């Protein structure tokens, strides 16, 4: 089990998923770090000369129906034909519907995330 699949200890666990790109091969890698690890310095976590930070994504404190941690910028399958992008807006995590008639934003806790599933955004274009 890698650090992306470990279940969260508590809803208050403060985690960040770093999206990193290697400077040589330009390969994208995902790494999850606790706030305690980050406070010790990024150089203790990865070689800052060999990686560039693409973005940081906050852990929502919620799990999908498969027990995977839900992070900011994850895509969720809510129901057939309905997907939602996780964002942090106005002090809370929200799901932004991508269904053509909606585009609505609702609090993530109202999405029944225990019935949602994290999906690969590449699948949305198929």
Image: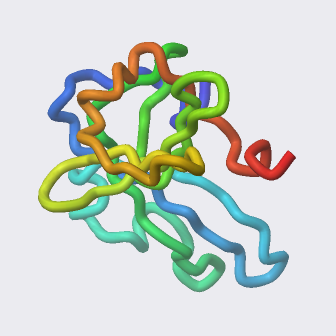
Q: Residue at x 59, y 54 (%)?
A: 30
In this view, the residue in front, 112 or 71, is 112
Residue 17 visible in image:
yes
Tell me if 78 is positioned left or right of 44 in this view.
Answer: right
Which percent across, then down, holds residue 81?
Answer: 65, 32
Which percent across, then down, holds residue 84?
Answer: 49, 43
Count of numbered circles in the view: 0
Tell me if 20 is positioned left or right of 69 in this view.
Answer: right
Tell me if 90 is positioned left or right of 88 in this view.
Answer: left
Q: How is the image coloured?
A: rainbow
Which percent across, then down, holds residue 21?
Answer: 67, 73
Residue 95 position (above or below residue 9): below
- Quadrant location of the C terminus? top right
- Quadrant location of the N terminus? top right
Residue 56 position (above or below residue 49): above
Q: Residue at x 23, y 60 (%)?
A: 89
Residue 32 visible in image:
no
Residue 112 position (above or below residue 76): above
In this view, the residue in front, 30 or 63, is 63
Residue 54 position (above or below residue 31): below
Q: Quadrant of residue 38?
A: bottom left
Q: Residue at x 36, y 55 (%)?
A: 87
Q: Residue at x 42, y 65 (%)?
A: 56
Which percent across, then down, holds residue 5?
Answer: 54, 27
């Amino acid at each position: 089990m890698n650090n992306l699949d470990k279940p969260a200890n508590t809803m208050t666990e403060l985690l960040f998923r770093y999206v990193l790109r290697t400077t040589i091969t330009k390969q994208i890698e995902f790494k999850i770090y606790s706030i305690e690890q980050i406070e010790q310095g990024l150089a203790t976590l990865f070689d800052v000369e060999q990686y560039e930070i693409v973005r940081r994504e906050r852990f929502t404190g919620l799990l999908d129906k498969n027990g995977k941690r839900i992070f900011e910028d994850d895509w969720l399958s809510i129901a057939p034909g309905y997907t939602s992008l996780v964002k942090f807006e106005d002090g809370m995590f929200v799901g932004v519907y991508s269904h053509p008639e909606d585009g609505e934003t609702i609090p993530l806790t109202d999405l029944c995330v225990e019935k949602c599933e994290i999906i690969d955004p590449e699948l949305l274009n198929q």
